Amino acid sequence: MDFQLLQTYNYAFLDEGSKREIRRTALKAVAIPGYQVPFASRELPIGRGWGTGGLQLTLSLIGAGDCLKVIDQGHDDSVNAVSIKKLVKACTQITTTTDSEQASIIQTRHRIPEAALRQDQILVFQVPEPEPLRRVESREQETKRLHAEMDYSSIWLRLYEDIVKWGKITIGPDYPAMVNHRYIINPSPIPRFDLPKLNQAEGLYLFGAGREKKIYAVPPYTDVIPLAFEDYPFETEHFEGCRCRLCGGTDTFLDEIYDEQTGEKVYQCSDTDNCRKRRERRHSIE
């Protein structure tokens, strides 16, 4: 985008009134951890359900001194990640990066980076479905009442039915968690492997659902406890006996892929930045 054309756009694409309203909503969400704050979701040049909620948060928070990283399923080079990064850069001319440690704002879809967030970093989630009670209650007015009364018996019953039927809790992504001992949230479709990273984290986590017009937050140093029973504790995905085919890592979230050359099932780190750094460290030692 040339400089003259850039002048026809407001900084960060959204108008100043829209950005102020979204920032006020985000502040309220931070003040009430886990509470879904409604906001007037704006139209953007991407389809609703493809990250408009997270993108609106990013465009409202980003400034000239920020550095942006965008990931999709842990990857820096997916279509969703690259397209969003191009849009933000075209409207702001800010610096972008693939390094999780250099970024001040990270927008993500379905993963939390392996590197722990610092106090000066914000992780923005793209959320397709913000309501954790949607599995058990389809009516919006009813879910609001249940949250207000802190009546989560229906979701506990859903977990119990899983155990009776399958012998374990079968929920994978979107695993419900209690925030600050008050609200149950949907942590977006991150794997269970990432859910413990929300608990008492140093960075700020913001969740934006553009299609559902909701924003909620997990502030720094906040308790985030996955729902579980004493005799059926919360468990993350297991990768015993598996290692990344590129860096050899065994303590990260691994994607199962099919190797076309060998015809075998192999594993690879979901977080491409973390995998790259491990390989660089290994080569420097060698």
Image (tube, rainbow, N blue to C red):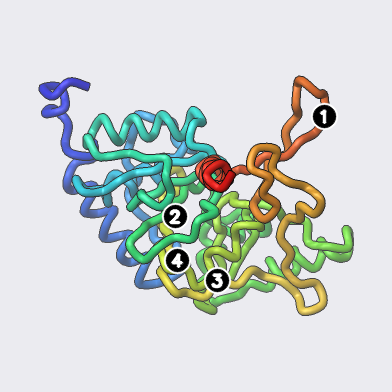
Q: Is residue 256 above or below residue 260?
A: below
Q: Position of residue 94 (x, y in %)?
A: 24, 39
Disc 3 is placed on an element classified as strand
Q: Residues within 10 Å of mark 3 (few under 14, many from 20)?
A: many
Out of 258 and 276, give the one closest to the viewer: 276
Disc 4 is placed on an element classified as strand
Q: Mark 4 highlights which residue?
A: 218
Residue type, label 4: Val
In the rendered structure, are the residues bearing label 2 and label 1 in contact, judged by CB atoms less than 8 Å apart? Answer: no
* Distance between the alpha carbons at the discs numbered 2 and 1: 37 Å
Q: Which mark is residue 264?
A: 1
Q: Mark 3 highlights which residue?
A: 224
Q: Position of residue 41 (x, y in %)?
A: 35, 45
Of pointers 2 and 3, the one earlier in the residue sequence: 2
Q: Is residue 28 above or below residue 8?
A: below
In the rendered structure, are the residues bearing label 3 and label 4 in contact, judged by CB atoms less than 8 Å apart? Answer: yes
* Distance between the alpha carbons at the discs numbered 4 and 1: 40 Å
Q: Mark 2 highlights which residue?
A: 207
In the rendered structure, are the residues bearing label 4 and label 2 in contact, judged by CB atoms less than 8 Å apart? Answer: yes
- Which residue is rendered at x = 68% and y = 73% of the image? 153
Q: Residues within 10 Å of mark 1 (few under 14, many from 20)?
A: few
Q: Nearer the viewer, mark 2 or mark 1?
A: 1
